[in-house]
Amino acid sequence: MSDHSSALWLVFGGDPAFYAIVLLSLEVSICAVLLAAAVALPFGAVLALVNFPGRSFIVVVTNAFMGLPPVVVGLAVYLLLSRSGPLGPLGILFTPSAMIIAQAILVAPIIAALTRQTVEDLWREYQDELTALGISPARRVRTLLWDARYSLVTTLLAGFGRAAAEVGTVMIVGGNIAGATRTMTTAIALETSKGDLQLAMGLGFVLITLIIVVNALAWSVRRFSEARAG
Amino acid sequence: MRGPDTALPLQFDRVSLSLGGVDVIKDLTLTLAGAAPVVLVGPNGSGKSTLLRLAMGLVQPTHGRVTWGGLAAPGDRLAIVFQRPVMLRRSARANIDYVLGRSDKLSASVLLERVGLAHVANRPARRLSGGEQQRLALARALARNPEILLLDEPSASLDPAATKALEDILREVAASGVKIVMSTHDIGQARRIGAEVVFLVGGRAIEHGPAARFFSSPASREATAFLKGELVL
């Protein structure tokens, strides 16, 4: 670990290309989680509260999609965005936008399924009270999402973990283009195949550290707001 | 919307309710009218909580019907305080604002003042003591400006001081013209609050009448035994 490719050198060596990779990784993962959450949080909550024919089927499919194979999602998004695909005219294949969309698809079922379970459990506790208070169905959804917020932070972190650790989809729809769509995971895969195991290890070390830091931040925010709001 | 209509009298017409094959309420006929506070007494499992849930319209009877002022829907002039009220994860004041509409003349501050919680208005509701939470639940129920206020064993888990604080507020609420219907297994509390008593055993209303008469000369063998502190099966 004494040569220039050690993790320490990576972090403190001031290589702008490396920082760009780290920033892009964070940007893509965080945007993907936010995009997925915007859809999956309300979807999960509605699924928890509303009874309709076929609900069980949708619950099972949502749960099953937590295990969507990343390469398959990557391939599907690739086909959608490729020049001859239906969304080809957007011209976003091999850009961070494509990576965000693909990862959001991967992360959304995780957030939806965990939200559905969390909100359903909370609904059991709240049902009588909210019904007696005459709260409208739309407001029930909002109330339950808000009151489950501390648990839902963990749900979002699960989604972030999936996105940050993932390599298959971003490789396919991003293309691992240096300076444009190279993330930490694709860089690790590349360096490994090139035989630069030390650099790959260094990158891996940095990636894991970053994931821990993001989780620690989320944990602190949760503890702080829980202490204030109860 | 019923608007200014009245939810009284609250009538149970040959109401039965079975839950999971068990008859919790059996052929119960009961009319609650006037302004006098009513207490539901009876042994555990006699159907007091279920009766209140029926009165609130939270469950539908298996047989018979419940009517409010002659109508089949409860309207919005009813409120209930549960034995274990659910506090929303926000401040005490926000728990009341949650129920208040923008056009309501009532204000959270006035309601908090009324239940003696003005000093903890900004504290998280879930951090309040059991007695404070019950009073907050009461304030939240009053925010609905109810004509009928149902309470399910509101002081079951409270110490005497907290119970007294709650009862003092209930007396004021009753004096302001709100019809109180409260279940309790505390005979002392029934004497202190109730002007009318409904005595339930095994899902049936065995006695219904003025509290003074019920406590001095109960008509049924079960009530006599219950008041003596014996187990009523």
Image (tube, helix red, strand yellow):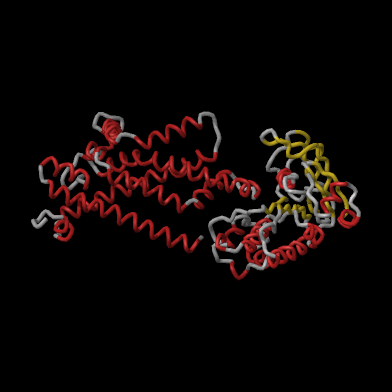
Asked whether B68 or B116 is in front, the reply is: B116
Residue B180: image quadrant is bottom right
Q: Position of residue B210 (x, y in %)?
A: 88, 54
Asked whether A127 or B93 is in front, the reply is: A127
Instruction: Look at the picture and state if B66 lies above or below B38.
Output: above
Q: Position of residue A109 (x, y in %)?
A: 39, 38
> Is residue B6 found left or right of B213 in the rendered image?
left
Asked whether B49 or B227 is in front, the reply is: B227
Q: Looking at this rendering, what residue extends furthest in the front direction?
A: B230
Tally of numbered discs: 0
Residue B164: image quadrant is bottom right
Picture quarter with the C terminus of chain B:
top right
> Can residue B158 be seen in the rendering of this structure?
yes
Q: Looking at this rendering, what residue extends furthest in the bottom direction?
A: B119
User: At 51% from the left edge and 32% from the top edge, which residue is drawn?
Assistant: A55
Q: Position of residue A224 (x, y in %)?
A: 43, 62
Picture quarter with the N terminus of chain B:
top right
User: At 77% from the left edge and 40% from the top edge, which residue is drawn?
Assistant: B66
Q: Position of residue A79 (x, y in %)?
A: 27, 30
Asked whether B20 or A40 is in front, the reply is: B20
User: At 76% from the left edge and 51% from the top edge, which residue is drawn?
Assistant: B4
User: At 15% from the left edge and 45% from the top edge, which residue is drawn?
Assistant: A178
> Can residue B177 be seen in the rendering of this structure?
no
> Is residue A23 found left or right of B96 in the rendered image?
left
> Is residue A60 found left or right of B195 in the rendered image?
left
> Is residue B230 found left or right of A218 in the rendered image?
right
